[in-house]
Image (tube, rainbow, N blue to C red):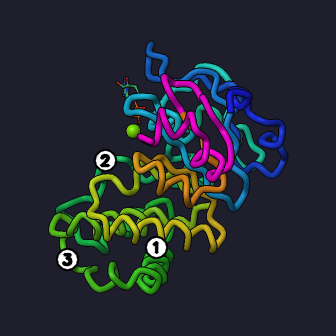
Amino acid sequence: MSETHTTPESDRGSDALLELSGVTAGYGNTTVIHDVELAVEEESIACLIGPNGSGKSTLMKSVYGFADVFEGAVRFDGDDVTGRSPQESLASGMSYVLQSASVFPDMSVHENMLMGGYVFEDDDRARERAEELYEEFPIIGDIRDQKAGTLSGGQRRLLELARALMVDPELMLLDEPSIGLEPKFIDDVFERIRQLNDLGTTLLLVEQNAEKGLSVADRGFVLASGEIKFAGTGTELLEDEEVGRLYLGG
Ligand SMILES: Nc1ncnc2c1ncn2[C@@H]1O[C@H](COP(=O)(O)OP(=O)(O)O)[C@@H](O)[C@H]1O
Ligand SMILES: [Mg+2]
């Protein structure tokens, strides 16, 4: 699999909803990821794995606008979006679920949901969208009046996913959706990821739980020391001897 140091030509097709070419990014004077080539096809799931500190979150942040892109380009839906702000990214059809917990604990579940729709000019639209999502996520609908700070870890993660859907995004960036969850909630979250994808959402996820992540993914990427070391289908990475030994604990 050493040939995959360079991204295959097939990754540069026009069907890519998201495309990073030669992206070098970081924060201020610090470069964290180097010369990253990565493409996510429309309506697919891509999973990024790699050791802690390798720059996975930074890569996601460089797409959304939380990190600085020093070189290269990010294209989304055919547009050059390099250097856009998070607000612009959200308005253009991306949403980002952060690695760290991001619910507002003193607000109700419903108020948290409405915050996810703050880009709507019209409050009625946000309320209607929240109602639609309560039907898709009855677990969240049932606890809409509860303070978010009182939710279990699994409920919080579902709220974060539902809130990120308020804008009906084309692309969802999910940073470690299963981190810190009990096993039964982990399966729940991956089931949701599959469902969202079936409904047409394109997903780029980062996962510590590499086997679960790669098993739902159409394509997988291994990031180490800020560089893409392997790229392939989820199955190819799961079956690759070197990837298994170095990154899957096999
Ligand atoms: N806001 C920041 N400012 C400066 N350095 C950062 C910042 N966030 C992360 N880093 C550094 O970038 C490197 C990669 O971090 P990160 O992207 O969070 O990796 P991963 O998500 O793979 O664990 C780490 O060395 C980390 O210290
Ligand atoms: Mg991270």
Q: Tell me which amino acid carries mark 1.
A: Ala
Q: Is residue 225 magenta?
A: yes
Marks 2/3: CA–CA distance: 21 Å
- Judging by the rendered image, the residue that carries numbered circle 3 is 146
Q: Is residue 72 above or below residue 124?
A: above
Image location (x, y in percent) of residue 70: 58, 20
Q: Secondary structure at mark 2?
A: loop
Residue pictured at 42% horizontal, 69% vertical: 162
- Judging by the rendered image, the residue that carries numbered circle 2 is 100
Q: Is residue 216 magenta?
A: no
Residue pictured at 76% horizontal, 48% vertical: 16
90 with respect to 80 (left or right): left
* Badge 1 or badge 2: first in the primary sequence: 2
Q: Tell me which amino acid carries mark 2.
A: Ser
Where residue 217 sits, quadrant-wise, is bottom right
Q: Secondary structure at mark 1?
A: helix
Q: Which residues are magenta?
A: 223-250
Marks 1/3: CA–CA distance: 19 Å
